[in-house]
Image (tube, grey):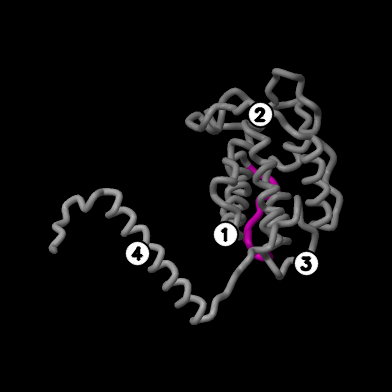
């Protein structure tokens, strides 16, 4: 049976009663991991939506956090603002699989942008609401990575990243350091030999 969008009477931005599912039981991801039970942080979700609105320069449609992001359209628009041309094709409507392609293009684009693979959510995490907190963590990671891109002068998300402390040494300093290390290793070697009573060595008088 093909995977279909929810049927008649479904409103994409209505709250779902606790314990109920707004998506059909015939999952598009029969072999993916089971839903993860994690607490969601509504303040973080609101902060992310506010950041996206600021980056895009337009108001987002009303509705729940996950429903606003679910089809991947806004996510693709977001990465195209951060890194123009990252997603060449965005499906604004279509089948479930076409909409999931939006998410997959977004995932590939943010990985190329610098978000670590382990921080990128799986497609089912968002499309089937299996792990919305992971979606949030991923978007915070994306907001953090923008700080590494000097070409991006717009708003970032989350705390400011600490500057990398790069230290440079002259050739004389490096040679002095190597000499000190050699003396230290020689001292340790002597201490080791003394402690072992000359094991395996013959002392010639």
The x and y percentages for residue 64 are: 79, 35
Disc number for residue 38: 2
User: Alpha carbon of mark 1 to alpha carbon of mark 2: how far?
Assistant: 28 Å
Q: Earlier in the sequence, mark 3 or mark 4?
A: 3
Foreground tag (1 vs 2): 2
Q: Nearer the viewer, mark 4 or mark 2?
A: 4
Does residue 5 show up? Answer: yes
Quadrant of the frame with the C terminus: bottom left
Secondary structure beneath dot 3 equals loop
Element type at marker 2? loop
* Category of crowding for the residue at label 1, using alpha-carbon neighbours closer than 10 angstroms: few (below 14), some (14–19), many (at least 20): few
The segment highlighted magenta reads 83-94
- Given residues 99 and 56, the one toward you in this image is 56
Residue under label 3: 153
First in sequence: mark 3 or mark 1? 1
> Residue 186: which numbered mark, if any?
4
Q: Which residue is disc 1 drawn over?
A: 112
**Mark before the other along the chain sequence, 4 or 2:** 2
Q: Nearer the viewer, mark 3 or mark 4?
A: 4
């Amino acid at each position: 049976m093909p995977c279909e969008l929810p049927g008649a009477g479904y409103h994409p931005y209505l709250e779902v009663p606790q314990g109920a599912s707004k998506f059909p039981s015939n999952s598009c991801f029969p072999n993916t991991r089971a839903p993860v039970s994690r607490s969601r942080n509504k303040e973080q979700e609101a902060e992310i939506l506010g950041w996206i609105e600021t980056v895009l320069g337009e108001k987002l449609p009303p509705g729940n956090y996950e429903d606003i992001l679910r089809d991947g359209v806004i996510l693709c628009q977001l990465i195209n603002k951060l890194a123009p041309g990252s997603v060449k094709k965005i499906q604004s409507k279509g089948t479930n699989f076409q909409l999931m392609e939006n998410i997959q293009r977004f995932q590939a684009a943010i990985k190329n942008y610098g978000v670590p693979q382990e921080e990128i959510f799986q497609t089912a995490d968002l499309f089937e609401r299996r792990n919305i907190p992971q979606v949030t963590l991923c978007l915070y990671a994306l907001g953090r990575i923008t700080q590494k891109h000097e070409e991006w002068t717009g708003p970032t998300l989350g705390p400011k990243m600490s500057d990398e402390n790069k230290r440079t040494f002259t050739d004389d300093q490096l040679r002095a350091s190597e000499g000190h290390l050699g003396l230290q290793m020689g001292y340790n070697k002597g201490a080791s030999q003394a402690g072992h009573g000359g094991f395996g060595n013959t002392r010639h008088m």
